[in-house]
Amino acid sequence: MHALSLLGEPGLPADFPHWPWVNPSAPKGGELVRPAVGSFDSLNPYILRGTQAAGLLQVFDTLLASSLDEASTEYAHLASGIELPADRRGITFLIHERARWHDGKPVTAADAAWTFNTLREKGHPFYRAYWGDVTEVVAEDARRLTFRFKDDKNRELGLILGQMPVLPQHAWEGRDFAQPSLDLPLGSGPYKVERIEAGRSITYRRVADYWGRDLPTVKGTANFDTIRFEYFRDTAVLFEAFKAGQVDVRQENIARLWATGYDFPAFRQGQVKRQEIPNEVPTGMQGFAMNLRRPMFQDRRVREALGLMFDFEWMNANLFYGSYKRTTSYFSNSELASSGLPSEGELLILSAFRGRVPEELFTSEYRVPVSDGSNTNREAARRALALLQAAGWTVRDRKLVNAQNQPFAFEMLLSDATYERIALPYVQSLARLGIEARVRTVDPAQYQKRMDEFDYDMTVALFPQSLSPGNEQRDFFSSDKAREPGSRNVIGISDPVVDALVELVIAAPDRQALIDRCRALDRVLLWGFYVVPQWHLSAFRIAWWDKFGKPERNPRYALDLASWWVEPARERALPPKPAAPAATP
């Protein structure tokens, strides 16, 4: 087999020449300078400790390559072929006979087996959940790598194993994989690390004799001779650096800047371009997430009350220039999102949990609060206060306190000062109920450490989704992961019902079952009021200095900068690039 797909047959035949959206004749050369925020202290992107440098994944080949134009489809890459047993309780990958590490040694099935075992034992805790249904991995010979599964229920397991990077066993002999390091990594991918300035910049050099340069999954990509990431202390400094030409491209996630920030000379003169590119990417859930490990958030009525005080309509009009949609699902912008009342298929699933989930789930449509946009929604405040009082909180001397006279006070932890302008109006709304919320912004390294240790009350969390959710849902929502430092169960959900629904999603036998099961899980999460839903945008907003060529279209599910290239004539028409930016660790 040349490909795997969860949604029917792969869209491309075994002899496809290249990805449909790329320019296979794109010229090689030039430099792409990209921005990053914060700092880094590790060149190992696969462990919990340390802050990894941007761009490292392009150093390492994966067994299969995901199509950015198809949902849940992967094609042969480092593995030249795929074999599935009749019982579907395993998968075999054939390592490409030409595959080589950057030091010239062959990539072997033994390397891949060592990688799997090492990542599961010493890598980020995520891998233990993601690969939990694998019982054994065997390097049968130099090229044959076989995984065996505990059963045939986990339909996406072959796909997620295809996403596995393969690391060189010989390069790690005598070294502790679990420790962060700034040693230049050895890989087999299209780029290698050329140099670093610790915490400030990292430069990648295209591998001229890259073994996979003629693969259909590579042609038309990896066009830049060098890719450099420059680090900045915050997003404001980063934007000024972009305006000055110190970085080449910027993906804009601040609505205010997109609406008003691009009136600068280079943009007016046509030297900087920008575009809003529609996409079909499921946007998942972004919101103010409450840490259920804190007693104050363990009552569902309290969490619902906090959601009532978020005035999205005011924020969208006054802060976002009306550019966003309110998120109403953990699977937003996809057919997996729940809406209305449960369908017959959903009811068959949810009825088994009746009495253990909110009864409103069966009788009422979940709706996020909608305000008049005045930021003084008194009706919402009255409803919120009633819920808080029912949960045992009362207002005394303008402060919300419990029966022990302890105030309702918490800290909202942020990693980016940009979010302060969203958090502070929300804090002011909460203050009208007597809630004392504080906003604290810390540097990315400290933020990551506190997140890994679950040391926060509330934060902004993102639960990204694909069109084929599966094993990653364990890391987001399962009870085991609520207790495992470094997991992505930010909320701390520990609910047997959610655990059961997650396992049903993973074991969905067909597409309709997956839709029904995701919608059922979605409803239980929404009616738990675990997050205050924020917003989403179904497009990429990108700005760039006009030195690039790019394909006529972008793939449906990602922004593929790897398929861009430098046009020398355009680059010569631009003003000289300024001196290296004053990046800070």
Image (cartoon, rainbow, N blue to C red):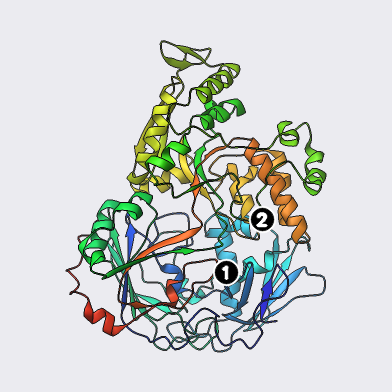
Name the residue tied to disc 1.
164
The residue closer to the viewer here, 170 or 35, is 35
Q: Nearer the viewer, residue 351 or 502?
A: 351
Considering only vertical position in the picture, is 319 above or below 72?
above
Asked whether the viewer can see residue 479, the reply is yes
Relative to 184, is 79 on the left or the right? right
CA gap between label 1 and label 2 equals 27 Å
Q: Nearer the viewer, residue 60 or 115?
A: 60
Residue 118, numbered circle: none
The total number of labels drawn is: 2
Would you say residue 358 is visible in this rendering? no
Residue sitting at x 66%, y 60%: 468
Marks 1 & 2, CB-CB < 8 Å contact: no
Judge left or right: residue 578 versus residue 469. Answer: left
Q: Is residue 135 above or below residue 64?
A: above
Q: Amino acid at mark 1?
A: Met
Q: Is residue 210 left or right of residue 446?
A: right
Q: Position of residue 563 (x, y in %)?
A: 44, 77
Which numbered disc, 1 or 2, marks the residue that appears first in the sequence? Answer: 1
Residue 204 % position (x, y): 35, 74
Mark 2 lies on a secondary structure that is: loop
Task: Assign the C terminus to one quadrant of the image.
Answer: bottom left
Residue at 71% from the left image edge and 68% from the top image edge: 7
Q: Where residue 554 appears, x then y in whole percent?
A: 49, 72
Residue 70, quarter of picture: bottom right
Crowd around label 1: few <14 · some 14–19 · many ≥20 (10 Å): some
**Secondary structure at numbered mark 1:** loop
Whole-percent x, y for residue 386 in the image: 57, 18
Q: What amino acid is at disc 2?
A: Glu
Q: Quadrant of residue 524?
A: top right
Residue 495, compared with residue 68, is above or below; it is above
- Residue 335 bears which disc, if any? 2
